[in-house]
Structure formats: structure tokens, C-alpha cells
Amino acid sequence: MSEPAEYMQRPFGGIASQMPLNVEAVTTDHTSWTYVGNCAEDPGDEEPTCVFANSSFANGRGISVITSPRIAEIIAKSPAFLDASVLSDVNQYDSPPFEVRELPGRGKGLIANKTIHRGDRIFLSTPILMLGADSFEFNDDSVEEEQRYHAVTKLPSKTEMLFWALYGQMWKDPISDRVNTNSFGADIDDENFSIVFPEISRLNHDCRPNAEYYFNANTLTQSVVATTTITPGMEITISYIDVSQPRDKRLSQLRNWGIECSCKACTQSSTLVEASDARLAQIAELDRNLSSAIAPPEVPEKLVKLYNEEGLFGFLGAAYRFAALSYCAQGKRSQAVEYAQMAFDSALSDNALNLNQAEYMKRLAQQPEKQRCWRFGLGLALQGK
């Protein structure tokens, strides 16, 4: 059972009234969609919000999107729609490295049935339902409910069954309950979406997770990658919130969504909690200092140590990057190469580096003497690195 989290889905409250719109007024290329309809807009809106569905998407898995014609056109022009080979290896669950089990007090969870190594991909899934932020803003709930009903029923029957098999906390209506409980947040162009990946939704929360997830807006895929070794019998978990916060803040945030966290980091003794919170405070301070300029190597080395002690393995890539830049600035080749390679490798299993940073680490690992940081001295600003 996957529970909701603040950054995974957001019930956008709206105040404007709504007005139905004839689908004929929607100006977008319909050839990428097998269904376009159920449009509505608020007075003053530049565009309506409509249901766009493609029943053949991702080898017949299908997809339904509730958004504006402008965003729908952007989605339809993505490689996910234009190049079938992009999705050739998605949604393959014939022999997964896990099995679904009932867990005491936690509902269903995914338990590893083979060793999963750091960087191994556990999931690569396409969404079945995408709800743009505008679709949450109608003043009349019945408009939202009708759009969501049509979005779900336009999915292929097997895919629709996947949606209805999801757990939903009883908040509103059966569809919204499942969306609010299971959706992940992601951006397409300038719009935030609540996106449903039914298989990934089985992952439970842990404040010290052993996997992380990433959404690719070009391929419309979400991957889940191990951030540490997961042995058979271990539950595969992700984090629903910012887990670098102290325990009380984590618990408060999770309780807002009806979650009583029972992970080890939250249920350990008060003495261990105090020690953990102290480490998290150190991490925050070191991260602030390292984000502006290169520090002596012992500073990022300390950050690496703290992340490992806290079990925050998904953050290690950033610490490795700081260490690589520090050793590069001092002209220490072997250490710079070692940490740059670890930072680049970590980019495959965590979300700590952006694409430019990962590419820079790759170049630094290969030819450190040719990089701007080489023997530049400490205090080098990190802009562009």
C-alpha cells in the first residue's frame, strides 16, 4: 500500500466557477489521441481543461491525461509518443526482483526475492493517469469527478483494472481517493501533474529508503533505482517526503496524510533520535557551506561520513561531487578521479546531481588536469560546476 505525501500529489483547491466547453473548440492535434473530450474551463481561463486519452500508448497499456490542449500537444510531441522504441523495455513485470506480500500494519509491500545492487533498476513504468494542476481547480467537485471518471474509463480494460486495484483512503470519491493516495508529483513544461503508476504505488515509505524514483518527462517514464544493496527478504522502500528533516518534522508531515511512520529511524530510542537529529543538523550546515564554494577536503569527507551513518544513501552523489571538486582544486589527481567517478556512478542511482553536474564529473574523472577546477585553489565558486 502506498500512502500519500505532500510532494507526491497535491489536491489543488480552486475558487473559480466552471463552464462546460464543446470539444470542437479545442485547438490541438487530435491524431495522437484516441479520445478528446469532457472539456471545461473557468471564466477568465486562457484554455479549457480536457480529457486526452490514447488507448494504444506503451504497447496497449494506454494513458489518460487531464490537462490543457497546449500541454497535451507538448506531451503528444514527446519522444514517448513519436518513437515507439523509446518504450520498448517498459512495464515488464513477468519476472520482477520482488514479490507482493501482506505486511503487518503496513498493508501490501514489495519484498526483494533476489539481491538488488546499488544502481540496479527495479521499475521502469509509464503512467496510466496524469492529472494536471488545473484539473483540481474547479469549484464544483462534480466537474472534477466527471473528468476523472471518463479518464479512467477510457483506459484499456486491463489497465483500468490496475487502477481500481489500488488502495484509496476514504476522503472524497473512489477515483479521487485512489489518485490522492497513490499519485506522484512531476512537472510537464510549466504545469504540475499528479501521476499514477500502479505498480510503483505498491512501494511503502521509509525515512531511510533503499530506493529512489525519477520521472523522465521526455519518455513519460518513472524509474525506481536501488540506492544501496537490497538482499532477499528486505522490503523495497522509497521516501514520500524530504527525509533530511529531523524526526518530529517528518512525523508531523506524514501525519498530515494519515501516515504513522513506523520505520526504524522514527521508532528508535530517544537517545538515538537525538543523535540522528544532531547529524541531520550537521548535514544541513555542511551542505549550505559546500553549496557556495569549495572547502577543504575534510569537509565533504565529513559529509560523506554523515550521510552513510544516517543511511541517506540517495544523497551521497552530492557529497562525492563536493569532494571531487575539493581534491581537484588542490591538484590531488587520484582522489579527484576517485570521487568524481563515484559521483558520476551515483548519478545512476540517486537524484543528487543534475545532468550538467554528472557530465562534469565524468570529464573530471577522465581528464582532471583539463578541468577548470584543477589547482584552482580553495574557495572556488561552484557556479557552473
Image (cartoon, grey):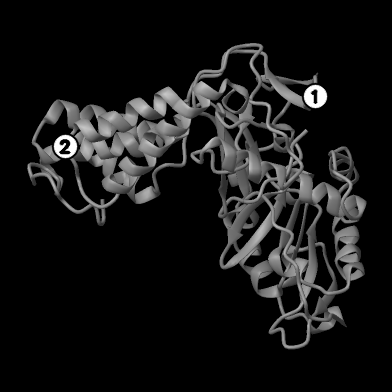
Q: Is residue 38 above or below residue 358?
A: below
**Could you tell me which residue is drawn at 39 percent across and 48 percent down?**
355
From the top left corner, tell me how far across and down residue 91 is, in percent.
70, 36
Position of 249 compared to 299: left or right?
Answer: right
User: Is residue 72 left or right of 304 when viewed as pictured?
Assistant: right
Q: In the rendered image, which residue does mark 1 sit on?
A: 105
Q: What amino acid type should be assigned to the residue bearing mark 2?
A: Pro
Q: Amino acid at mark 1?
A: Gly
Q: State the residue lying farthest toward the front.
A: 271
Instruction: Look at the image and tell me whether residue 155 can be seen.
Output: no
Q: Secondary structure at mark 1?
A: loop
Choose top left, top right, bottom left or bottom right for residue 361: top left
Where is mark 2, residue-wise? 296
Image quadrant in which you'd find residue 353: top left
Q: Which sits in the foreground, 36 or 194?
A: 194
Q: Secondary structure at mark 2?
A: loop
Q: Which numbered dot is residue 96?
A: none
Pick the quarter of the image with the N terminus.
Answer: top right
Q: Position of residue 127 (x, y in %)?
A: 71, 48
Side of 140 relative to 12 (left or right): right
Q: Which is nearer the eye, 350 or 206?
A: 206
Residue shown at 61% from the left, 54% from the top: 186
Q: Nearer the viewer, residue 280 or 36?
A: 280
Is residue 117 visible in the rendered image? The answer is yes
Q: Extreme bottom residue here?
A: 44
**Residue 41 x/y as whole percent:** 79, 80
Tag 2: Cα neighbours inside 10 Å, few (<14), some, or many (≥20)?
some
